[in-house]
Amino acid sequence: MKLTSFLAASALFMGATVASAEGWTVNDLGSVDERAECMRLAEATVDAYRATYGGDGFTGRSEWTIGGYDLRGDVVDALFICPIEAGLVAPFLVVYNSDSDNDARETVADRLTNLWDQQVPRSGTGFPNPGGNK
């Protein structure tokens, strides 16, 4: 039930590319064709974050989410959500901090979004493949 409430609240933010509130940052990551691809991209992004910036956290998985926990100590967590909307997967990223360092949370969100963008397949033109991000 908590997940349903969380997703309903998060969906309110999906209309904007980036939305911030005290302790939360929500980023729209575009769209991809398949949920499996979204999950692969999300896990690769969390792995790339840890390889680049360190962190001893863990990764949680469900059927349609990837959670990167303890990305900055034990106070910043991220959740990649891969819902299906109108036949496409419409991924978004929620980053949460439990302390008052909102700048650090924003930095983690920006880093994850940039790493996601690096993972998204590109066509030979330098633009994302149809259904890819930005």
Image: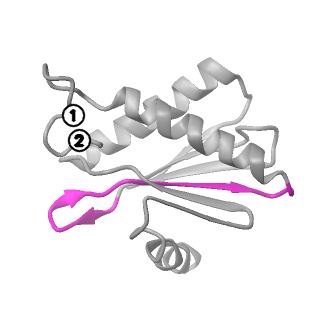
Residue 102: x and y in percent read 77, 53
- Percent x, y of residue 104: 76, 43
Q: Quadrant of the C terminus?
A: top left
- Residue found at the far right of this picture: 100
Name the residue beneath numbered marker 2: 132
- Disc count in the image? 2
Q: Can you give x and y, in whole percent of width and height, for residue 91 in the image? A: 36, 54
| SS state under label 1 | loop
Q: Amino acid at mark 1?
A: Pro
Contact check, label 2 and label 1, Cβ < 8 Å: yes
- Which stretch did the figure color magenta? 83-100
Where on the picture, by quarter, is residue 119?
top left
Q: Residues within 10 Å of mark 2 (few under 14, many from 20)?
A: many
Residue name at image x 81 percent, y 58 percent: 98
64 sits to left or right of 98: left
Q: Secondary structure at mark 2?
A: loop
From what the image shows, is residue 117 above or below residue 29? above
Q: Is residue 92 located in the magenta-colored stretch of the structure? A: yes
Residue 4 visible within the image = yes
Instruction: Determine which quarter of the picture holds residue 89.
Output: bottom left
Q: Which residue is mark 1?
A: 128
Residue nearer the viewer, 78 or 104: 104
